[in-house]
Amino acid sequence: MYKKNCIKRRNFLKRSAFGIIGAGMAATAGCVKEPEPPEKQEEEPLLRVKEHRVLGRTGFKVSDIGAGSIQDEGVLGAAFDAGVNYVDTAEQYPGHHKTVGQAIKGRDRKSIFIATKLQVLEDKSKEGFLKRARKCLEEINTEYVDCMMMHMPEKVETLKTEGFHSAMQELKAEGRIRFIGVSNHGSFWFKDPEETMEKVLLAAAEDGRFDVFLMAYNFLQMDQAEKVLEVCKDRKIGAALMKSTPIAIYYSLKSRLEQLEKEEKEIHPLYSSGLERYREKYDRAQDFIKKYNLQNQTEIRDAAVRFVLDNPNVNTVCCLPKTHDELEQFLLLSGTKLKDWDKAKLSAYREGCGELYCRHACGICEPQCPHTVPVNTIMRYNHYFMAQGREKEGMEKYAAIPGAKADKCGSCSGYCETACPYNVPIQGMLLLAHNQLSLAKKLGF
Ligand code: SF4
Ligand code: SF4
């Protein structure tokens, strides 16, 4: 069992603090009584997952609160100790396979459902996929993974990649993987605006070879995933969620703007109008947040998790606690029900701040950009940086974008913004994202 079970230890310390003080007082008073051994029940973690749901045709009972790509091995180990038993990882998450490998060490392997992913790259040969899949297993240091997913196929055609499927069949026959899955959070590139998450995942359901889906679904972005979730229920496809708490971006952008103001950086005039429009909505959201007492990010995040779990077609939601305290907050949500109070807060947040969220899995505006800037992809990389603690990865991915980046947005009329059906002040947000992801201070921030 993992030794750094901090939830257990910390709660034990909290609960036994008076006992320790009491023992100290007794000793000073000259009492020689043997100290009593700690109560047996303290051996178990105090907070545990309370609900499990069947992950489609895999038959595996997964915890409603799952683990996303948690970077801290101790936090992940504590999550397993508390009964979290679904963990999401990928070949592309730097170092994360090793973190999972460390955290599962010494545990009953069968009690944890590990899902990892391989992207379809240039080499589409069976041998290529086999080699990469075996490396994943080696990195995790496990005999098998429960699910090998195709990582974010950008179009329907990619789902049919023969090399991937024959490699998966061979690995299945060897007992190295148990199920096949697919993840998606929207079209990867502006060239395929028609290839939405909904279209790709519905085609994957039709294909029949994918047992588990990982998709983006949250209270600000429901339509696409809700249709897919219905099909998942009908076809017994496991449904895991990601990007379910779309509120961090507001708070992150808020602190970024505040930082820029504090530094009294002169903003380049080319950027002013885009940022101005962002600023206007941001100010309105601030007023709204004050009026409805929405200052507490945790309350809204909790309501957002309860919202997605309220959908009976959802099996598990991948959460990303960075600390033990955050993990405890997520664990407290397990098995709880969406309340009227949650609905009211979410609806207020949607009204006040909904326009500040560039929807994951969207991309509607991208065909309008004369420079072919991949708007939604850039905002996702910015999300990695700002909301998920994956700063380096976000910056590397941004640097690797082969075409135009968001520095183009400072000298543009904002065609994407006009095309956005959600009224997102995206030009200003792209400029902030560029500033963040390239750390291009020389550009005037
Ligand atoms: S700016 Fe609007 S249309 Fe463009 S990707 Fe974001 S949410 Fe979709
Ligand atoms: S602001 Fe202009 S350059 Fe930037 S993504 Fe939008 S349309 Fe393209």
Image: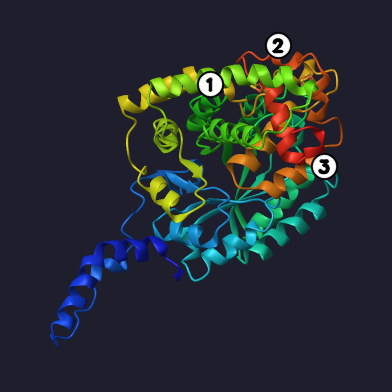
Q: Which color scheme is applied?
A: rainbow
The x and y percentages for residue 436 are: 71, 38
Q: Which mark is residue 354?
A: 1
Q: Earlier in the sequence, mark 1 or mark 3?
A: 1
- The residue pinned by badge 2 equals 418
Q: CA distance from mark 1 to mark 3?
A: 30 Å
Name the kind of residue labelled 1 in the image: Gly
Please indicate whether residue 129 sits to the left or right of residue 249 in the image.
right
User: How far is mark 2 from mark 1, CA to CA?
Assistant: 17 Å
Q: CA distance from mark 3 to mark 2?
A: 27 Å
Of residues 87 and 167, the one nearer the viewer is 87
Q: Name the kind of residue labelled 2 in the image.
A: Thr
Q: Earlier in the sequence, mark 2 or mark 1?
A: 1
Label 3: few (<14), some (14–19) or many (≥20) C-alpha neighbours in 10 Å: few
Q: Image height check: is 293 above or below 437? A: above
Q: Exactly how many numbered labels are in the figure?
A: 3
Q: Is residue 14 left or right of residue 293?
A: left
